Amino acid sequence: MKIKRIISAALLTAILITAAVCLASCGGAKKSAEPSPIEGEWDCADTYLETDEGYTGFYRLRVERDGTFSMYDCEAGNPGISGTVIANSDSELEFYCDKDDFDPPFEWDVNYNFKAAYRLDGDTLYISHSNRTLVFTKITEEE
């Protein structure tokens, strides 16, 4: 009888530890309880704000109300980044990216989770990282 209790306790402990490890490492992107201030679909300008070198006009950013996002190549279908974005303040975004097909904007030195500066000016969104700013224009229903 005592052996059964010990085995049961050991199995329960192993299950709880496995569940905790999975939740800690498998969680991926976080969810935001607040509506995203950058909700909507956005097209990127042809180049970074700081330089005319390098084409960025293929990027499209889609942000849902709950903060889930996808920044992808809308011209060639190449992967980009996706996951959850949270506005920490009116000037900082925090990205929690999924690890599948992780291909961030070139010249952005980022990992799966990173912070970026942003500014929202009407229908124009500026997102900056690694001294490079992507400039997006909101896509309206009429377009």
Image (spheres, helix red, strand yellow):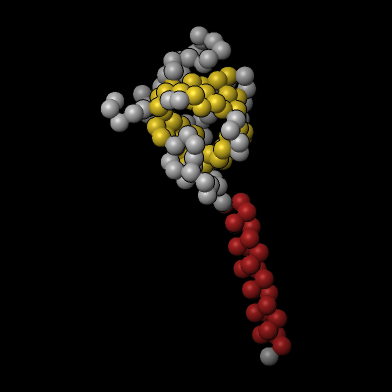
| Relative side of 27 to 63, left or right | right
- Compare residues 18 and 46 and report the one nearer the observer: 46
| Relative side of 123 to 99, left or right | left
Q: Is residue 142 at least partly visible in the picture? A: yes
| Relative side of 138 to 26, left or right | left
What is the x, y in percent for residue 72? Answer: 43, 30
What is the x, y in percent for residue 15? Answer: 61, 68
Q: Residue furthest left?
A: 142
Q: Is residue 79 at least partly visible in the picture? A: no
Please give the count of numbered marks on the rendered protein: 0
> Which quadrant does the C terminus fall into?
top left
Which residue is located at x 63 percent, y 54 percent?
Answer: 24
Which residue is located at x 70 percent, y 81 percent?
Answer: 6
Which residue is located at x 59 percent, y 56 percent?
Answer: 23
- Compare residues 18 and 23 and report the one nearer the observer: 23
- Compare residues 128 and 99 and report the one nearer the observer: 128
Q: Residue furthest bottom?
A: 1
What is the x, y in percent for residue 85? Answer: 53, 39
Q: Looking at the picture, does residue 13 appear above or below residue 99?
A: below
Q: Quadrant of residue 58?
A: top left
Q: Residue furthest top?
A: 52
- Compare residues 67 and 16 and report the one nearer the observer: 67
What is the x, y in percent for residue 92? Answer: 60, 32
Q: Looking at the picture, does residue 19 appear above or below residue 6?
A: above
Q: Residue furthest front?
A: 122
> Which quadrant does the N terminus fall into?
bottom right
Q: Quadrant of residue 107?
A: top right
| Relative side of 65 to 142, left or right | right
Q: Looking at the picture, does residue 6 appear above or below residue 46?
A: below
Which residue is located at x 63 percent, y 60 percent?
Answer: 20
